[in-house]
Image (cartoon, grey):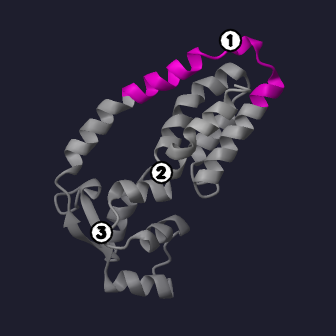
Amino acid sequence: MTDSTPDASLAVFGKTALGQQEIQSRALGLNPLTRRVLILIDGKRKYQELATLTGVQNLAELLNELVAKGCIEVTATLSAAPSKASSSSSASPQKAATSKDDLAQLPPAETRTFKQAEMAKNFMMNTVNTVFQQNTRLTLLEAIFGCKTPQEVRRVYPRWVETMEGSVIGAKRLPEFREKLFQVL
């Protein structure tokens, strides 16, 4: 990022007149993902909410691209975000430990059948696609899909939990999902 490029994670963005026009005309030829991000920008949503809604790994790059094209501008700068980010990063190891603790209560992975591993994979992919827009968490879905053994599915489990916790609906339904998943995981 250059000095003139804002720190996207500390900014609230709003559409410019050009951005409003772009939604109607599609004159800039934005790719579908960038266009979706532009549509979601409303001058109120914070970076984390946009990241959750879009599931985009490179959201800051897309936001900076939209700023450079004149489609959006910073409407507010957040000062509380750094402390929130540092508290969430310190909470991440705890979440991962909790996920691994969850797995410790399960029967050994070697006792699970191939069919049960497939059922666990399908359940995890279906819950991701139910809580979030269809196929918006592609890296997680690909990781789940690529699992061949119950052990591999269990290695992806902490990422699945973290993803679910990133959504209000997912966090609310996580205990129910976990209980069902553990029947086959």
Residue 117: x and y in percent read 75, 27
What amino acid type is highlighted by mark number 2?
Val
Q: Nearer the viewer, residue 175 or 138?
A: 175
Task: Give the image quarter of residue 156.
Answer: top right
Residue in the image at 53% along x and 35% along y: 161
**Is 58 left, or right, of 1 in this rendering?**
right
Which badge, 3 or 2, comes first in the chain's sequence? 3
Callout 1: helix, strand or loop?
loop
What amino acid type is highlighted by mark number 3?
Phe
Callout 2: helix, strand or loop?
helix
**Is 142 left, or right, of 118 in this rendering?**
left
Marks 2 & 1, CB-CB < 8 Å contact: no
Report the disc number at residue 108. 1
Which badge, 1 or 3, comes first in the chain's sequence? 3
3 vs 2, front mark = 2
Is residue 27 in view?
no
Marks 1 and 3 sit apart, C-alpha to C-alpha, by 48 Å
